[in-house]
Image (spheres, grey):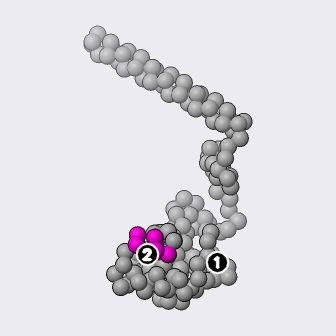
Amino acid sequence: MKKYSYELKLKIVKEKEEGYGDRYLAKKYKVSRTSVKAWYNQYRYLGEEVLKEYKENPTYTEEFKHYVLKYRQENNLSYIQTAQIFKIKHTSTIRKWQDKINRLGYTGLNETITEEKNPGEEIMSKKKNKLTQEEIEKLKEELEYLRAENLYLKKLKALIQGKNQKTEKKQ
């Protein structure tokens, strides 16, 4: 991921405040529109300080995460409002915590928990997202099996419906 200077981010944000659009600024400074939007929103909600480069991503304790989510729920706040209050740079951080709790319960925020993945998901999550020929063949076989199973179930359903219709006619 490309790092941009604090000065450049601030310059872009200030120009956006003057009324320039995301597309124009992204093209002018050769950055993504997503970055322009993110920097502007972060600046707007959390102030100028948030545009400064961090040496490393902040880490939060499990207790802090629980507190933030509980506070958000009790006060019926959006992710943006919650991020503002707790000075969390990315609203997606809070959303990810919430998703973990929704999927895994309150123990889901514990970093030591390993989540179960689908076999296909595991293959696709490789760094380069490139599949080996063996993996492609395995997926093709699985797809063929699932198609056959689907066809079988459709025929079974049709047979059952046909049998039910015949018994209804007899009655």
Q: Nearer the viewer, residue 103 or 44?
A: 44
Seen at 37% across and 20% down, the residue is 161
Q: Please identify the quarter of the rendering in which residue 134 is found.
A: top right
Secondary structure type for disc 1: loop
Tell me where residue 164 appears, x and y as whole percent: 35, 18
Tell me where residue 45 appears, x and y as whole percent: 44, 84
Q: Which mark is residue 33?
A: none
Q: Earlier in the sequence, mark 2 or mark 1?
A: 2
Seen at 43% across and 86% down, the residue is 14
Q: Is residue 55 left or right of residue 150?
A: right
Please give the residue where the numbered disc 2 appears in the rendered image. Answer: 25
Q: Is residue 94 visible?
A: no
Question: In the rendered view, would you say 151 is above or below 91?
Answer: above
Q: Please identify the quarter of the rendering in which residue 171 is found.
A: top left
Span colored in magenta: 23-29
Please give the residue where the numbered disc 1 appears in the rendered image. Answer: 57
Characterize the local packing of mark 1: few (<14), some (14-19) or many (20 or more) Cα atoms within 10 angstroms.
few
Question: In the rendered view, would you say 168 is above or below 39?
Answer: above
Q: Is residue 122 left or right of residue 156?
A: right
* Amino acid beneath label 2: Leu
Seen at 32% across and 12% down, the residue is 166
* Amino acid beneath label 1: Asn
